[in-house]
Image (spheres, helix red, strand yellow):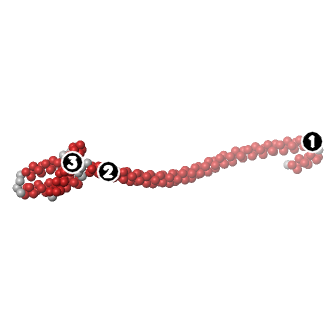
C-alpha cells in the first residue's frame, strides 16, 4: 500500500493520489474496527480466564489460611492447658498452706484433731468394753453418750472455751495411763 502511494505521488496524478489516500484511510479504518472487534471477543475470553484463575487462587489461599488457623488454635489450646495446669497447682499449694496454718492455729487453741478424737473414741469404747466385761450396766449409758458425741457438733466458741479443760484432762489421762 505504501509503495502504491509512492508510485502515485511520483506520477503526479492528483485524482489518483487522492483516491489512493482515500482507499488507504478506508483500509486503516477497517483494520482498526477489526482490531477493536477482535479485542472485544478476546477480552471476554481473557476476562473469563482471569476469573477462573482468581477462583483457583482464592481456593488455595483459603485452604492455606484454614491450615494456619488450625495450627494457631492448636498452639493456643496447648498454652491454655499449661496455664490451667499451673494455676491448679498454685491453687492446690495455696490451699495446703491455708489448711496447715488453720491446723496449727487450732492446735494452739487446744482444739483436738480428728485423729485425736478418733483415738479418744477408741479408748472410750475399750473402757466401755472393760466395764461391760466386769458386769456393769453403766457401760450402756456411756456407749449412748459416745454415740451422741460422735454425731453432736460443738460450736467453735464452746470448743475454744473448753480447750483448756480438755488439755488438762488429756494431761491427767496421760499421767494415769
Residue for point 27% across, 50% down: 108
User: What is the residue that sits farthest to the left in this orientation?
Assistant: 135
Q: Position of residue 34 (x, y in %)?
A: 75, 45
Along the line of sight, which residue is nearer the eye, 27 or 127? 127
Q: Position of residue 30 (x, y in %)?
A: 78, 44
Quarter-of-image position of residue 20 = top right
Query: Mark 2 and mark 1 in contact (Cβ < 8 Å)?
Result: no
Q: Position of residue 122 (x, y in %)?
A: 17, 56
On the picture, is 12 further left or further right than 130? right
Crowding around mark 2 (Cα neighbors within 10 Å: few <14, some 14 to 19, many 20+) is few
* Foreground label between 3 and 2: 3
Q: Which of marks 2 and 1 precedes in the sequence?
A: 1
The numbered mark at residue 164 is: 3
Residue for point 33% across, 50% down: 98
| Mark 1–mark 2 distance (CA, rounded to whole Å) | 123 Å
On the picture, is 141 further left or further right than 103? left
Does dot 2 land on a helix, a strand or a loop?
helix
Q: Position of residue 2 (x, y in %)?
A: 86, 49
On the picture, is 50 further left or further right than 177? right
On the picture, is 45 further left or further right than 13? left
Residue beneath disc 2: 101
| Mark 3–mark 2 distance (CA, rounded to whole Å) | 20 Å
Residue beneath disc 1: 14
Figure check: 22 above or below 176: above
Amino acid at each position: 500500500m505504501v509503495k502504491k502511494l509512492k508510485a502515485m505521488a511520483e506520477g503526479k496524478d492528483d485524482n489518483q493520489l487522492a483516491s489512493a489516500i482515500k482507499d488507504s484511510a478506508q483500509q486503516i479504518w477497517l483494520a482498526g474496527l477489526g482490531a477493536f472487534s477482535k479485542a472485544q471477543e478476546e477480552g471476554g475470553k481473557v476476562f473469563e480466564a482471569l476469573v477462573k484463575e482468581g477462583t483457583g487462587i482464592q481456593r488455595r489461599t483459603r485452604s492455606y489460611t484454614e491450615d494456619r488457623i488450625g495450627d494457631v488454635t492448636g498452639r493456643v489450646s496447648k498454652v491454655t492447658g499449661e496455664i490451667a495446669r499451673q494455676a491448679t497447682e498454685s491453687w492446690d499449694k495455696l490451699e495446703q498452706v491455708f489448711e496447715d496454718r488453720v491446723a496449727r492455729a487450732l492446735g494452739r487453741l487446744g482444739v483436738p484433731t480428728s485423729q485425736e478424737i478418733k483415738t479418744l473414741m477408741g479408748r472410750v469404747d475399750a473402757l466401755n468394753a472393760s466395764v461391760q466385761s466386769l458386769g456393769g450396766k453403766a457401760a450402756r449409758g456411756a456407749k449412748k453418750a459416745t454415740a451422741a458425741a460422735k454425731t453432736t457438733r460443738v460450736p467453735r466458741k464452746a470448743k475454744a472455751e473448753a480447750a483448756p479443760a480438755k488439755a488438762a484432762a488429756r494431761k491427767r489421762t496421760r499421767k494415769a495411763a
